[in-house]
Image: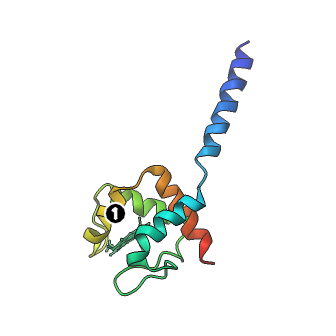
Amino acid sequence: MKRAMFLVLFALGGAGAAHAEADIAAGEETYQGVCRNCHGPKAQGIASYPRLSDKDADYLTERLERYRDGEKIGPNSMLMIPHAKELSDADIANLAGYITTAFD
Ligand code: HEC
């Protein structure tokens, strides 16, 4: 009986993890609606707006979480922090998924 309980919980945990996968279409909508205004239509960056298309998902996630916390990282963080504040964990995962797959 205990064992059956464990298997049920394990199965539910697995289903939850699947939902956490990046929704690339949602990431595209946010990116092209907001982020492109500064980082460019292909995340190529321009002037003091950094290129994103050459970064990996872990890096993008870490940076977005730190900006969301209001942390100053580079000289122009004040431009980036207000946009990161709007993002949920799912938004960040979706954006990282989109940015790392759309511009190869
Ligand atoms: C108003 C312009 C602006 C908008 C809009 C904007 N950013 Fe930024 N972003 C910046 C600037 C400027 C920096 C560099 C900040 C610094 O100096 O710390 C930055 C930095 C970043 C970084 C870190 C890059 C690195 O090389 O470390 C990431 C990741 C990022 N932005 C993602 C996004 C995403 C995703 C969005 C859309 C939700 C977005 N940005 C919207 C201006 C913007």
Above or below for 89 versus 44: above
Q: Going by the picture, which residue comes out furthest to the top? A: 1
Q: Where residue 12 sits: x, y (%)?
A: 65, 31
83 left or right of 1 in image: left
Q: Quadrant of ligand 1?
A: bottom left
Above or below: residue 56 compared with residue 47: above
Direction from residue 5 to residue 92 in the image, left or right: left
Q: Residue at x 28, y 71 (%)?
A: 79
Please, is residue 60 above or below residue 20 in the view? Answer: below
The amino acid on which the numbered mark 1 sits, given as a three-letter code, is His
Q: Nearer the viewer, residue 98 or 10?
A: 98
Q: Is residue 20 left or right of residue 48?
A: right
In the rendered image, which residue does mark 1 sit on?
83
Where is 27 relative to 17, above or below?
below
Q: Is mark 1 within 8 Å of ligand 1?
A: yes
Image quadrant holding the C terminus, namely bottom right
Residue located 42% across and 70% down the image: 35
* Quarter of image, res 10: top right
Count of picture labels: 1
